Amino acid sequence: MRVAAVILGFVALASLARGASELAPGVDLIPGTFVAGTQPDGNTVVFAAPDGLVVFDTGRYPTHAQQIVDLANAAKKPVAAIVNSHWHLDHVGGNLLLREKYPGVRVYASGAIEDAMHGFLANYRAQLEDAIAKAGDDTAKQAPRRAELALIDAGPKLFPDQRIGETSTRTIAGQAFRVGFEGHAVTAGDVWIIDPASRVLASGDLVTLPAPLFDTACAEHWKDALGRLGDVDFKLLVPGHGAPMGRADLATYRRAFDRLLECAAGKSPKQACIDGWMHDAEALIPASDEKLARSLLDYYVDGNLRGDPAGRRKLCET
């Protein structure tokens, strides 16, 4: 099994972003981070509900999760609920700290993480152990790998209390949200959420910038999921990685995504597919992230979109 570029061994090229910002009244964004040589954190969206804060994705590192705690302290509200978009560690790792700080918190997510613990994450764990053994006494290299091991070994502490397997309206922490479910898109089970009052939609990795992240994805089902996201009545969409976007931006993203899949399915050179994405999604990609986008797609076109056909089919199994 190859080491995944983003959720496993990603060497980032993008700039670091810090600090919470208000997206709408009662809705805050804690941006994810990409730091060179380390694993990323995903974006976190925090909704203020009557019974406490509803946190969509919790990042990977305690430093990211602590920003959620700080926001809760400033709001004088507890974290009442966590909604995890999917099981990648950069979206669920903060569950540990938040469950410790708020014992009554309820976690909502698909059950896909349980299968991943016996498949993808088990393989990743073996890779980490091998890398630790090879690092010898180099504590600087061992520390982040051991931290990853600890997250995986937390097992059930990352799991949901309430499993989501369909799209429906749910009352969470005293507030109604539309909670969506997509099967076998980015992962075996992906969740999104929209607050009808603010019309802020948190998509998780169903949308990522500066490029789609195909490590565990069924590209064809992901394309269909993007179409359904386009039908949601949102004003602002927060991707799993990258800056918030409007409706026209999502339409641009979808067109670029579709054309990337078409190119990868054909006989065009890989570089043509990369150049096509860079052209089609140009308006969405900051200049500082262009090198990162090209690096990601250089990896994914060969490794995922044109990789092992049997492996790709397995990711699409329902």
Image (cartoon, helix red, strand yellow):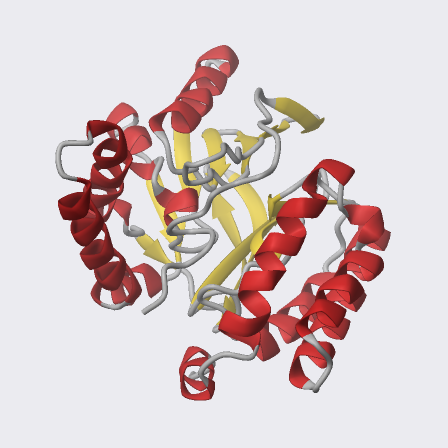
Asked whether 109 or 42 is in front, the reply is 42
Image quarter hosting the C terminus: bottom left
- Is residue 235 positioned above or below 110 on the image? above
The structure residue drawn at horizontal position 70% and vertical position 86%, both measured from the top left corner, is 266
Asked whether 88 or 3 is in front, the reply is 3
Please identify the quarter of the rendering in which residue 289 is found.
Answer: top right
Measured as percent of width and height from the top left, residue 133 is found at: 13, 46
Asked whether 269 or 159 is in front, the reply is 269
Count of labels in the image: 0
Describe residue 260's horizontal placement relative to residue 307 as left or right. Answer: right
Measured as percent of width and height from the top left, residue 158 is found at: 28, 46
- Is residue 91 positioned above or below 63 on the image? below
Please identify the quarter of the rendering in which residue 212 is found.
Answer: bottom right
Measured as percent of width and height from the top left, residue 226 is found at: 67, 66
Residue 195 visible in the picture: no
Describe residue 24's horizontal placement relative to residue 157 as left or right. Answer: right
Describe residue 97's horizontal placement relative to residue 211 as left or right. Answer: left
The structure residue drawn at horizontal position 30% and vertical position 65%, both measured from the top left corner, is 120
Describe residue 285's horizontal placement relative to residue 112 as left or right. Answer: right
- Is residue 185 positioned above or below 3 on the image? below
Residue 312 visible in the picture: yes
Measured as percent of width and height from the top left, residue 249 is found at: 81, 52
